[in-house]
Amino acid sequence: MIHPLDNPVWSALTTGNQSLALGNHQAKYYKPLVSLFVAVAQNTCAHFEALREIIPHDQTVALFTTEPNLDASPWMIVNRVDGCQMVFEGPTPEPQDEVERVRLTEKDIPRMLELTQLSPPGPFLTQTIEFGGYEGIFAGERLIAMAGRRFDNGSHVEISAVCTHPDYTGRGYARQLIDSQIRQLRAVGKIPYLHVRADNTRARDIYEGMGFVNRTEMIIYVLKKN
């Protein structure tokens, strides 16, 4: 049986993120200003052709898969990022001496976009906040750290967009925000997970120390219409 996290975007678009989904029974994608990620029910030429037919724009899109030798025809693969999918299995973290966290809303989008330009956590667009659950830490009017959620398949929720302003790294802000996400998700019976680049060994070591365990290799393919 295929685990829902083996095709995390498809699982999310057909369940917990359904309100943000466009497409059909073969291929789906997020609203373009929410996320560039797309998904197919199966990695076949017919499904990728269906994806090509429903995408209304020519910008690049991104696809998560465990397939190491993907044939995405008729799409052209323009980039590949190897990563790891890690699931949280540790004890729920207790609150420590923490600075104030603020729930981020639409009024904070300009600050969120500014932060993600300085410390890129991956694709972050003008409506990415619609995934929900975003929290931030401020220094005065400046947003200096944030974290939120992205793929939600009903049972598992991805912690995403974890980033810290370069002037404020090393103070434990990212860990505080991740711990907060873990507590909130655990409180409603959901399992936190995340993705990290395979070559980011420092981040992987930190996540393992927090209680995340490596579940599987996960590859992001950046696709362009051929």
Image (tube, grey):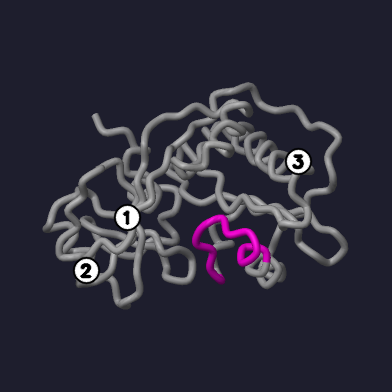
- Asked which secondary structure carries label 3, the reply is loop
Q: Which mark is residue 52?
A: 2
Give the residue displayed 59% in from the left and 55% down from the top. Answer: 132
The residue that label 1 is drawn on is: 221
The residue carrying mark 3 is 172
* First in sequence: mark 2 vs mark 1: 2
Whole-number angstrom distance, CA of label 2 to CA of label 3: 43 Å
Label 3 to label 1, Cα distance in Å?
31 Å
Quarter of the image with the C terminus in it: bottom left
Q: Which residues are magenta?
A: 115-126
| Quarter holding residue 183 | top right
Label 3 packing within 10 angstroms: few (<14), some (14-19), many (20+): few
Q: Is residue 93 above or below residue 172?
A: above
Q: Which residue is painted at 46% across and 49% down in the image?
A: 151
Q: Is residue 125 magenta?
A: yes
Give the image quarter of residue 95.
Answer: top right
Residue 214 is inside the magenta segment = no
Image position of 19 with respect to 198: above or below: below
